[in-house]
Image: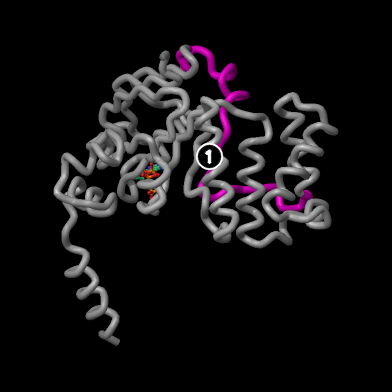
Amino acid sequence: MEPVITIKDLRMRYEKGKEEILKGINLQIYPGQIIGYIGPNGAGKSTTVKIMLGILDEFEGEINIFGRDISKDRTYYKKKIGYVPESAEIYENLTAHEYLTFLGEVYGIKAEKADNKAKKLLSLFGIKEGNYHSRISSYSKGMKQKLLIVASLIHDPDILFLDEPLSGLDANSVMIFKEVLAQLAANGKTIFYSSHIMEVVEKISDRILLLNEGQIVADGTFEELKAMSEEGSLEGIFNQLTGFNKHKDIADEFINTLKVV
Ligand SMILES: Nc1ncnc2c1ncn2[C@@H]1O[C@H](COP(=O)(O)OP(=O)(O)OP(=O)(O)O)[C@@H](O)[C@H]1O
């Protein structure tokens, strides 16, 4: 099977002369994989994703998506990818109906078709037609998250980049969305799933990538990662591979500092 994404020696620094944020990443990602992309705050996960999305272009190395170099052809692949950002600037004055039909049209879907699809997808997520026609500014956090998820999928992308996608979703919606992801992957879609919620990453991922200080320090299934470490949970593996064993000492110091007034 041909990889859907190939990354060769990816390096990135935000400012000249400053330290590299990404220090030589090499990866091949295949269709139908759910990739759990994890790592400590500041490891470089969002930077990698933004480079693949074409938002950042000052990188070194080579990235091929659908077999073509994204530096040479910057637009062709964007119709085939979807993105749920960790926090988004949505056009809050628009209604969901206006926003999603506009977005659908940007992707070349006819307004009526985008409208029907958006309305149906949101209703499956528990957002009623009345709310579909209200301004996004009136939405709760979870409703906005559902809107972002639907917006990322409206054009039926082949690759989906998700950053903490479950944020704010209620338990029922989480179950629906996890099942949707499993079915998308079974249909050959590729899902890049960034999250700090280790229990979820452990359960849904076919392959886990752990990024630490700009380098991939583990790459395998949860079972493979477990076999290389002494730990039984992904949280334990994460701590071991990032060399972290001080949570108790730090919490003690935190509490002691709080007591000083
Ligand atoms: N626009 C920017 N300008 C300068 N430095 C940046 C910029 N964006 C990110 N960085 C730096 O790059 C490093 C990696 O950041 P990045 O957002 O990719 O990490 P992350 O792994 O996604 O973290 P988190 O888990 O907190 O979301 C951090 O040190 C951050 O300060």
90 inside magenta stretch:
yes
The secondary element bearing badge 1 is classed as: helix
Tell which of 172 and 138 is nearer to you: 172
Seen at 40% across and 34% down, the residue is 48
Tell which of 254 and 81 is nearer to you: 81
Please state the extent of the stretch shown in magenta in the rendering.
68-95
Which x, y percent locates residue 147?
66, 48
Which x, y percent locates residue 155?
67, 30
Q: Quadrant of the N terminus?
A: top left
Exactly how many numbered labels are in the figure?
A: 1
In the image, taking residue 18 as reference, residue 181 lies left or right, namely: right
Dividing the image into four quarters, tell me where ligand 1 lies. top left
258 inside magenta stretch:
no
Secondary structure mainly formed by the magenta segment: loop
Q: Quadrant of the C terminus?
A: bottom left
- Residue 18 visible, this angle: no
Which x, y percent locates residue 76?
59, 17
Tell which of 17 and 158 is nearer to you: 158
In the image, taking residue 188 as reference, residue 14 lies left or right, namely: left
- Residue 102 visible, this angle: yes
Seen at 45% across and 14% down, the residue is 69
In the image, taking residue 181 as reference, residue 29 lies left or right, namely: left
Seen at 66% across and 62% down, the residue is 140
Count residues near mark 1 (Cα–Cα under 10 Å), then give few for <14, some for 14-19, many for 20+. some
Seen at 72% across and 29% down, the residue is 106
Disc 1 Cβ-to-ligand 1 distance below 8 Å: no
Check disc 1 and report the residue beneath it.
181
In the rendered image, which quarter is residue 118 located in? top right
Q: Amino acid at mark 1?
A: Leu
